[in-house]
Image (cartoon, rainbow, N blue to C red):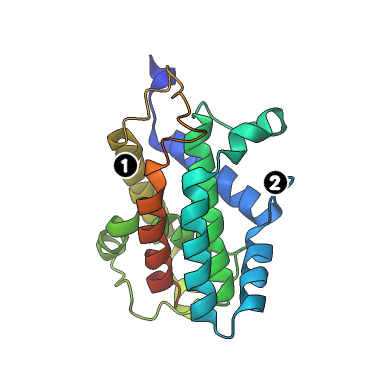
Amino acid sequence: MADNQLTDSKVGKLLDWAYEKSINGIPGSDTSYELAENFMAKHDSIDKAINSLVRWQNTKSATSGFLTGLGGLITLPVAIPANIASVTYVQIRMIAAIAHMRGFDLKDDQVKTFVFVCLTGQSASDILKQAGIKAGTALTKQAIKTIPGEIIKSINKAVGFRLVTKFGEKGVVNLGKAVPLVGGFIGGTVDGIGTNIIGKTAKKVFI
């Protein structure tokens, strides 16, 4: 039975995998850096570029079953349905692109943790508050760098726990039955709403 349970550690592996792919790329798909540069090239301010990226990503998330389409190219590190993995990847790539636009270094572990925090959407400020960090109080590049490793670990743990709950609420996580892909995706519902909230959260976190 244990194999079919979604656990913090499986979610952690999925997040690390999605983050690595968003920075280093998946064949046929832009990296976070490329995504950020494309949108910045089209707009005269970072804010406009970010808003435009979030809008574009919203329509994209709801329709793109692209990970399942890539099939054999991608080996997921854990037994997680491809639809969950693809939503997570698309959203992490968007958040990382926003962080990059704001000048954060995606290779920093602290920055990576904050990208994961944004995935929790409306729970983000609670998770940060519990760690003694006020979201929206200019988390500058310097401020993020000085957060101790212990706190980063506890934030990662809280994120994993929250995402296990979130995926569970979507009813998509009895891993024994990989979810049938409705129209190539989890009926598109995961996402239109989720992606918008996550995009707004990333705008607040990466100032």
Towards the viewer: 153 or 49: 49
Q: Amino acid at mark 1?
A: Lys
* Mark pair 1, 2: CA separation: 26 Å
Mark 2 secondary-structure assignment: loop
Q: Quadrant of the N terminus?
A: top left
**Mark 2 crowdedness (10 Å alpha carbons): few <14, some 14-19, many ≥20:** some
Residue 112 showing in the rendered view: no
Residue farthest front in this picture = 183
Q: Residue at x 42, y 55 (%)?
A: 195
Q: Amino acid at mark 2?
A: Ile
User: In this rendering, is residue 135 above or below 95?
Assistant: below
Mark 1 or 2, nearer chain start: 2
| Residue 101 in the figure: left or right of residue 9 | right
Residue farthest bottom in this picture = 44
Q: Residue at x 29, y 39 (%)?
A: 165
**Mark 1 crowdedness (10 Å alpha carbons): few <14, some 14-19, many ≥20:** some
Q: Residue at x 54, y 30 (%)?
A: 78
Residue farthest right in this picture = 27
Mark 1 secondary-structure assignment: helix
- Residue 185: x and y in percent read 48, 36
Tell me whether the residue at label 1 lies in contact with that at label 2, contact meaning CB atoms closer than 8 angstroms.
Answer: no
Towards the viewer: 25 or 41: 41
Q: Which residue is mark 1?
A: 166
- Residue 67: x and y in percent read 60, 38
Q: Which residue is mark 2?
A: 26
Residue farthest top in this picture = 1
Towards the viewer: 182 or 112: 182
Q: Quadrant of the C terminus?
A: bottom left
User: In this rendering, is residue 74 above or below 21?
Assistant: above
Q: Which image quadrant is residue 46 in?
A: bottom right
| Residue 140 in the figure: left or right of residue 25 | left
Towards the viewer: 133 or 202: 202
